[in-house]
Amino acid sequence: MDKLLAMKMFTATVDAQGFSAAARKLGVATSSVTRLVDGLEAELGTTLLNRSTRQVTLTEAGARYYSRARDIFEALDEADASVADRGEEPVGVLRLCMPVEFGRRVIAPHLGHFLARYPALELDIDMSDRLDDLLDGRYDLSIRLGDPSPNDELVCRPLGRFERWLVAGPGYLAGRGNLQHPSQLLDHACLRFRYGQKARPWRLKRGPEGLELDVNGPLRSANADLLREAALADTGIALLADWLVREDVAAGRLQRVFSDWQASPGAANDSINALYLPNHRGSRRVQAFIGFCEELLS
């Protein structure tokens, strides 16, 4: 028995939820699929599938075997892609992770142009504000804002920079007098981004003068767009990335506060970085997307 083929028939049966459906998808006879799965169970000495007239379901052993079999086939696909990926053109699947709003607002509108440029490339994108670990091999490339990874096992490639702006809705600022110095922020409702379990102080600098303010307010969140929406609703003053609020400021929905000061949360920097493992240095897929980001962010 060809065990790899039998494993393929087994996983296809699970994915299609039946022998006949798997056979149609693979273009083979149903009897061939059944025979190979039966042979696999006999060789393993255990039942992988519960069979009924309506459907097939995984046994407990079958669920474990299916998970490992899928890992094997994904590893085989990656091995094939890793060879093709060293050719002249990027080929295969590029697995990416990037922050939610940055991905949605800055990257996503331009992905059509990228894919048209590289028709043999497929993107698999997760958008998350968590600092996902690349070391488990789940992603080929991660785009991150602010502090680069301190992990020496990762390659950090700077892609560009951004600014952070203090913004508030016109309704919030109306009737509160003129804001003349950032120290006045201590008396205002500040909408704070949460890093981990705590909010960082706001750090502002203008020339030689610098301030670090432990601001307070009615709202903090790990989602930047939620803070933006709250600022638009005149809830308070927020410290947000320029790419997130630039259109709102241009349209007058938000107003900048202390625009002649540089602002950041704590010691966070303003870099946009691509992170990847050293074994992806020669990857055409990774380098193609990095080049695309550099063009976009320039």
Image (cartoon, rainbow, N blue to C red):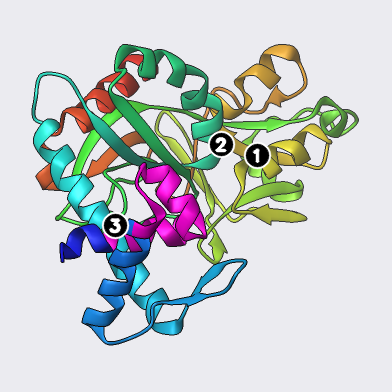
Which x, y percent locates residue 271?
Answer: 35, 34
Q: Which residue is mark 2?
A: 101
Please report the bounds of the magenta region as a residue range: 7-31
Residue 225 x, y percent position in the rendering: 65, 39
> Is residue 161 among what the camera can see?
yes
**199, above or below 197, in the image:** above
Residue in the foreground of this view, choosing between 212 and 27: 27
Q: Is residue 23 above or below residue 198?
A: above
Quarter where residue 39 is shown: bottom left
Circle 3/circle 1 CB separation < 8 Å: no
| Classed neighbour count for the residue bearing mark 2: other residues with Cα under 10 Å, few (<14), some (14–19), many (≥20) | some
What's the residue type where badge 1 is placed?
A: Asp
Using the image as rendered, state which of residue 266 and residue 144 is in the foreground.
144
Q: Are marks 1 and 2 in contact (CB under 8 Å)?
A: yes
Whether the magenta-drawn stretch holds residue 283 is answered as no
SS label for mark 1: helix
Q: Earlier in the sequence, mark 1 or mark 2?
A: 2
Q: Which residue is mark 3?
A: 8
Q: Magenta stretch mostly in which secondary structure?
A: helix
Is 255 left or right of 96, judged from the image as shown? right
Viewer-nearest residue: 274 or 288: 288
Q: Quadrant of the N terminus?
A: bottom left
Q: CA distance from mark 1 to mark 2?
A: 7 Å
The location of residue 105, given as percent across then percent down, is 56, 27
Q: Which residue is tagged 1?
A: 225
User: Type of residue at label 3?
Assistant: Lys
Distance of label 2 from label 3 (alpha carbons): 38 Å
Q: Quadrant of the C terminus?
A: top left
Q: Earlier in the sequence, mark 3 or mark 1?
A: 3
Q: Is residue 130 left or right of residue 150?
A: right
> At x 43% / y 59%, what residue is drawn?
13
